Amino acid sequence: MSFLTYLINGLSLGSIYAIIALGYTMVYGIAKMLNFAHGDFIMVGCYIIFSVSAALSGNSLVGIVIAVVLCTLLGITTEFIAYRPLRGAASPLAVLITAIGVSYLLENVALLIFGADIKSFTSVIKWEGLSFAGGELKIQGVTVITILVSLVILIALQLFINKTKQGQAMLAVAEDKGAATLMGINVNKTIMLTFAIGSALAAIAGALLCSAYPSLSPYTGAMPGIKAFVAAVLGGIGSVPGAMIGGLVLGIVEILSKTYISSQLSDAIVFGILVVVLLVKPTGILGKVIQEKV
Amino acid sequence: MKIDKKTKSNLITYGIVVAAFIIFTALASTGNLSSHMKGLLVPMIYYAVIAVALNLCVGILGELSIGHCGFMCIGAFTSAFFSKATADIIPGGIRFLLAFLIGIAFAALFGFLIGIPVLRLKGDYLAIVTLAFGEIIKNVINAFYVGIDKSGIHFSLKNAMDLGLDENGIVIVNGAMGITGTPHDSTFTIAVVVLLISLLVVQNLVNSRDGRAIMAIRDNYIAAESTGINVTRYKMMAFTISAAIAGAAGVLFSHNITTLTASSQYFGYNASIMILVYVVLGGIGNIRGSVIAACILYTLPELLRGFSTYRMLIYSIVLIVMMIVNWSPKIIEWRKRTLGKFNFRKNSGKEIA
C-alpha cells in the first residue's frame, strides 16, 4: 500500500511539473526561446496568493483569481518590454540572457518586498481527501485536486489549440513565422497570447505547488522551473501531450527515488533519466524529428 | 618583423592581462588595496579562466553549455583531494603543480566522457543535457564520501561510517560537508599565470588549422562535413579542451577557500549561467571580451556590497537593458543611422557572433 501512496504522490508532483512544463513548452514552441523566468512567475503567483489571503483573512479563492490575472499581466508585460525587442536578434543567446535577467529581477524584487525568510503557505485546498481500504490508503485532497486540475488544463489546452482559430494561429506561428504573417496572422499578438496562457498556468501551478509543499521563499520557483523545463524536453519540447508525459515521469521518478534509493541522489537520478531518454530519442518522447536539408 | 593582425590582437590580450597584473600587484604592495579587494583578486581571475573556457565552447564551437561549473567542480574536488591527501608528503610547489595536472586531467576526462553522448544532440537539447550533467556531478559529489587509511582509499555513497576506516584513517571528502582544510596555494600570481596559459591555448587553437575546422563546424556543419572535416573529432576536441580549462579554474578555486563544498552557489546551474552572462556580455567568440567582462562583472556586485539590498536588483536591470541595447535589431539599426551621420568609424565587426 505504501508503494501506491508514493506512486500517487509522484503523480501529484508530476502533475504540477506538467502544468509548469505546459507553459514552458508553449512559449518555446512559438517564440523559440527558453523563458528562464518562467519558474519565477510561479513564485510571484504564490506571493500574490499569500498576500491576498493574509489581507482577506484566508480567502484563498479570490487570491488565486487575482494571482492568475496579475501573472498574466506580468507575462504580457515581460514579453513586451524585455523579449519583443530582441526578436530577430543575431544570436538566440541574447533573449536567453535577457530571460535570466528577468529571473534575477523578479527574485530580487520579491526579496526586497517579502524578505529572505521562508513564509509558511496555507494550503488553498481545505478538503481532507479520500480514504480507501479502511484507512490504509489515504490520498490527500491536494493530491486529488492537483491531478484533476492538470487533466482539465491538458484537455482544455488541446481543445483550444486544435479547435479554435487562435489555437490554429499558434500552431501556424510555431511552424513558420513568415508564412503565418502572410496568412494574415498577427504574430506579435499570438506570441503575447501564448505568454499570457503560460503565465496564467504558472500562477495555477504555484497555488498547487505551495499547497503541497507549503514553504515560500523568493527562490521557490527556480528548481521546479528547471525541473519542469527538463520535463518539457523529456516529453519533446513544443509538444503539449509530451509536456504532460514528461512531467508525470519526472514527478514519479523523483518521489520513488527519494523514497527507495537516496534523497540526496534523487535529483541526479531525475537528470540521469533525461540524459538516457535523449540519447535514445534525441528530440524527446513525443518530439518531432526534423530532417535537416542542405 | 611583420606581425599579422591576429597575432597583434592576441598580444594585446596578453598585454592587458600583464598590465592589469602589474597594476594590481603594485597597488597591493603599496597598501592601496583594501583587504576586501585583495580577496577578490584570485576569484576574479578564476572566473575569467572559466569564462575563456566557456567561450571556447559557446563562441568558437557554437554549442551552448549551461553546465560548465560541473567541470570546474570536478577539477576543484579531484585537486583538493590530492592536495589534502598528500599535504604532509609532497612539498608545496610541486604538490600544487601536480594538483593542477590532476584537476585538469580529470576535468578533461569527464569532458571527454560527457562529450561523447552530449555532442550527438543539437541546440537547446544539448544545452539542457549539459545542465543535467552539471547537476548530476554536483549531486553525486554531495553524496560522496572518500576516506584514506593504511589499506588504501575507501569510497561510499552512504555516509562516513560506511567507509570502514581504521583508527588512523581520515575522511577526506565528507559528503555535503565537502573537503575542509585544503592548503591555500592559489596566489594572484599563479592565477594570472593560469589565465595566460589558458589564453595561449585558446587563442592559438582558434588561429590554428584545428581551430578553423572547429569554427567551420560552428558556421555550417553540413558544409564542414562535406569538405572532409571530421565533425565529431573536432567537436570532442574543443569540448574536452574547454572542460580541461574549466578544471584549471576549479583547481584555483579549491586552493583559495578553506571549505570546499559542492553547493549550488558555486557549482549549480545558476553559477554556470552567471558565467554564460560574462561570455555573452563580453562578446560571443571574443576571448578578450570574456576576460574583461568576467573581471568587471565579478568585482562590480562585490564592490557594491554597500548597497547590498539593491545591488542584485540593479545588476539585473543593467543586464536586461544592456542586452536590449546591444542586441535589439531595431536599436542596432538606429545606432548605425545616428552614428553614420557623424561619419564615425564603422563598426569593425569585432564580435564574431
Image: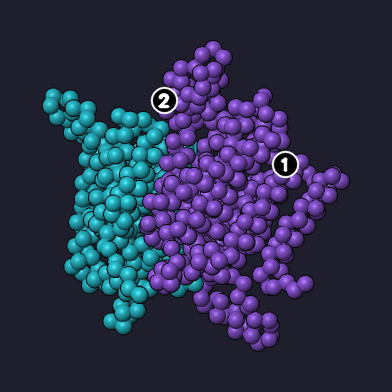
Q: Which mark is residue B158?
A: 2
Along the polypeptide, which appears first: circle 1 or circle 2? Answer: 2
Taking depth in this image into account, of B9 and A1 the one nearest to the observer is: B9
Q: Quadrant of residue A250?
A: top left
What percent of the width, then of the height, locates residue B304?
68, 50
Which coloring applies here? by chain
Q: Is residue B137 above or below residue B160?
A: below
In the rendering, at what x and y percent does residue A278 appear?
A: 32, 52
Chain of the residue under the numbered disc 1 shown in the image: B
Packing grade of label 1 (10 A; few <14, some 14-19, many >=20) is some
Chain in cyan on the image: A
Q: Secondary structure at mark 2?
A: loop
The residue drawn where x is 50% and y is 24% is B153
Q: Is residue A218 visible?
A: no
Chain bearing mark 2: B
Rendered location of residue B276, percent (x, y) = 54, 56
The reply, left or right, for residue B110 in relation to residue B350 is left
Amino acid at circle 1: Thr
Q: Residue furthest front?
A: B228
| Residue B23, label in figure | none
Residue found 55% across the figure and 62% down from its top:
B280
Please tell me which residue is depicted at 60% across the width and 75% down the height of the picture. Answer: B349
Residue B247 can be seen, yes or no? yes
Q: Residue B187, labelled with which disc? A: 1
Work out whether residue B46 or residue A8 is closer to the camera in this orientation and state it: B46
Q: Is residue B322 left or right of residue A28?
A: right
Left or right: B302 in relation to A275: right
Amino acid type, callout 2: Lys
Give the colour chain B carries in the figure.
Answer: purple
Q: Looking at the rendering, in which quadrant would you find the N terminus of chain A?
A: top left
